Amino acid sequence: MQVRTPLTLITGALGSGKTTLLRYILATVNRKIAILMNEFGEISIDSKIVAGKNVQMADLGGGCVCCSLLGEFEAAVNEIIETVAPDIIVVETTGLAEPDALVFDIQESIPIVRLDGVIAVVDADAMVRYPLIGHTERIQIAAVDIILLNKVDLVTEQQLYAIATKLGQINEVAQIISTQRCQIDPDLLFGIGRTEATIKPPHHVHQPQYTSFAYTTSATLTRDCFAEFADNLGEDVTRAKGFVRFPENTYLFNFVAGRWDLEEFTSEQTELVFIGKKIGDRQTEIVNRLKSCEQ
């Protein structure tokens, strides 16, 4: 009897904390883990964030892992098992992916793995700021076994209860676990043993309104100028992330739902990705504002 490698799928909206969860898993789980990542944007920021953690990783690049890259995904899974023989495979999808198609493909087309569980990361603060749950996020929530309700330190107890109630209405069976920076006992994430129910291929309709662009420079940026820039990015920027090089150090930049933060990180240059609805209309303006911060 063939031993099937357990595979855990992580989904969730842009900026919810999926990569933060990956980094926490890598730091706390003492097993051989293979990471498969799928990002939206020209520069693969997330793969650079988790690189160098003694894991084997295949970066699937831009596009939607749940449709256009299914064939490549299957090949990547088979190759990583043959060459690395990991104990666990963890797949992080782009925040714009609808995971139901990928769940179907894993269960129907990749017999070498066993889908152990599907986990969604939900940004509690973003749920308060933008309470309307879109089509893609609704599918992400409905398709999972565990919901990590992240960033709960940014909302009140009353708001947290209302969010949990809303999530429970979309997915009645998933366990909802509150977290800060996705810190959770890893034993709760693995060994779920998802039941392989009979499922039909999803009717998958893309919503192509999201676009992205990248900005790269070897120049250093003035910190005060960049802070003013980040404070005024605007609501049409859904997500921004990357590396910012100041004179004193380089930082990992994360922007979501109007909030942003910096974390010390090693990178040779400034590399930023901006994602939003019709974000291309603002590309020239945003790039010019960043250039004005260059030293």
Image (cartoon, helix red, strand yellow):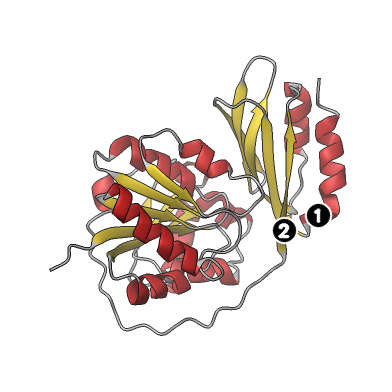
Residue found farthest to the top: 248
- Please state if 104 lies on the left or on the right of 282 as rendered: left
- In the picture, the disc for residue 211 is 2
Inspect this view and state whether residue 211 appears: yes
- The residue that appears at 51% across and 43% down in the rendered structure is 47
Which residue is disc 1 drawn over?
280
- Residues under numbered marks 1 and 2 in contact, where contact means CB atoms less than 8 Å apart: yes
- Residue 101 is situated, as x and y percent measured from the top left of the image, at 47, 74
Q: In this view, does 98 lie above or below 260?
A: below
- Please state if 92 lies on the left or on the right of 14 as rendered: left
- Residue 88 is situated, as x and y percent measured from the top left of the image, at 28, 52
| SS label for mark 2 | strand
First in residue order: circle 1 vs circle 2: 2
Out of 225 and 115, give the one closest to the viewer. 115
Out of 15 and 265, give the one closest to the viewer. 265
- The residue that appears at 35% across and 39% down in the rendered structure is 26
- Please state if 149 lies on the left or on the right of 223 as rendered: left
Q: What amino acid is found at the position of numbered circle 2 in the picture?
A: Thr
Q: Check disc 2: other Cα within 10 Å, few if <14, some if 14-19, many if 20+.
A: some
Q: In this view, does 168 lie above or below 13?
A: below
Q: In this view, does 119 lie above or below 26?
A: below
Q: Check disc 1: other Cα within 10 Å, few if <14, some if 14-19, many if 20+.
A: some
- Residue 103 is situated, as x and y percent measured from the top left of the image, at 40, 71
Task: Answer with the quarter of the image where residue 214 lies.
Answer: top right
Q: Is the N terminus in the top left, top right, bottom left or bottom right quadrant?
A: bottom left
- In the picture, the disc for residue 210 is none
